[in-house]
Amino acid sequence: MGTLRRLDTDQQVGLLFVVLFGLLLLLSAVIVALTWRESGEESTEDARERRRNLRRDLRALWVGALVFWAAWASGPLGATTALGVISFLALREFITLVHTRRGDHRSLLLAFFVALPLQYVLVGTRAFDLFTVFVPVYVFLAIPVAGALAGDPGRFLERNAKIQWGIMVCVYGLSHAPALLLLDLPGYAGRGAFLLFFLVVVTAAAQLAQETASRRLRRRPVARQIDRSFSWRAFGLGLAAAALVGAALFWITPTGPWQAATMALVAAGCGSLGELVMRALKKDAGVRYWGNRSSVTGAVGLLDRVAPLCFAAPVFFHFVRWYLV
């Protein structure tokens, strides 16, 4: 630990990525070995579905790690731009699967080409006070005004609510991820990458633990019509796993083990419940994945991969900023 503390910030973050990619390589080798062993046995449709989900989750982890590395390597401006592009693609996936009309064009132009860029400009300039209220105050008032000026009253409330919800999840929620990189904490300058890494790891740990527990425990689902695998026991085990991982990673945060475990609980709880919300939206839209190949989004499944982060990032950011700054 003393050797780690003698490294400068860039060296510590570089070592972090070495450990991260090493763990991913190890995890990939284990999953490939398990897949080969199970494929040689009698295979049911459920087993094939589990393997597909496992491979999809692994790909998502690799993509997330590479994006995370690229964002850090390109500096604060590059990180903000990269997350802004991801936010744009996620919002496009969301809107593509939502029923819109000609009267929504002005609202959509406002969302994609005004609200989204301005939100990330506020992140990049560290205008955090305005950044936290820009979407829920100004954009949410401007969107229905633009819709009303189009003169189409048909299903007006439903159409505007869907656009606002897409902005809330894909723009407002996700924009808090680069904000963590730029957040200045006392005695923690330049180490924002550790906070983002902490957030991603504890959220992913909760998701993996919850998914594994739901397969093994076979408990009564809480919301059968939305997600047959979501149960309170699996959710609790996911939170417990996140808390343990968070406490183990306290040394990369500006807090002690108990505070880090609490931060992990908050982030994991928001991410898991947010994932359930997004599954409800997919059920409503009649799709299995946001990036269905039958769609024309061009970014297959991106929103599926970042959905827990969209819900966890804003709460985690405010938790850290409120209690630690």
Image (cartoon, grey):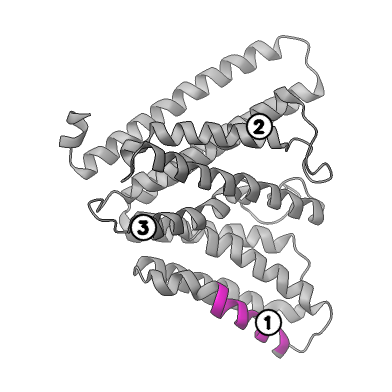
Element at label 2:
helix
Q: Which residues are magenta?
A: 136-148
Residue designated by label 1 = 144
Label 2 CA crowd tier, 10 Å (few <14, some 14–19, many 20+): some
- Tell me if residue 101 can be seen: no
- Foreground tag (3 vs 2): 2
Q: Quadrant of the C terminus?
A: bottom left
Q: Toward which corner of the image does residue 173 lie, by quadrant?
A: bottom right
Label 3 CA crowd tier, 10 Å (few <14, some 14–19, many 20+): some
247 or 11, which lies in front? 247
Element at label 1:
helix
Element at label 3:
helix
Q: Residue at x 33, y 51 (%)?
A: 192
Residues at marks 3 and 1 touching, judged by CB atoms closer than 8 Å: no
Is tag 1's residue or tag 2's residue first in the polypeptide sequence?
A: 1
At label 3, which amino acid type do we have?
Gly
The picture places residue 213, in percent across and down from the top left corner, at 66, 27
Residues at marks 3 and 2 touching, judged by CB atoms closer than 8 Å: no
At label 2, which amino acid type do we have?
Glu
Q: Is residue 22 above or below residue 34?
A: below
The CA span between labels 3 and 2 is: 33 Å
The CA span between labels 1 and 2 is: 38 Å
- The numbered dot on residue 211 is 2
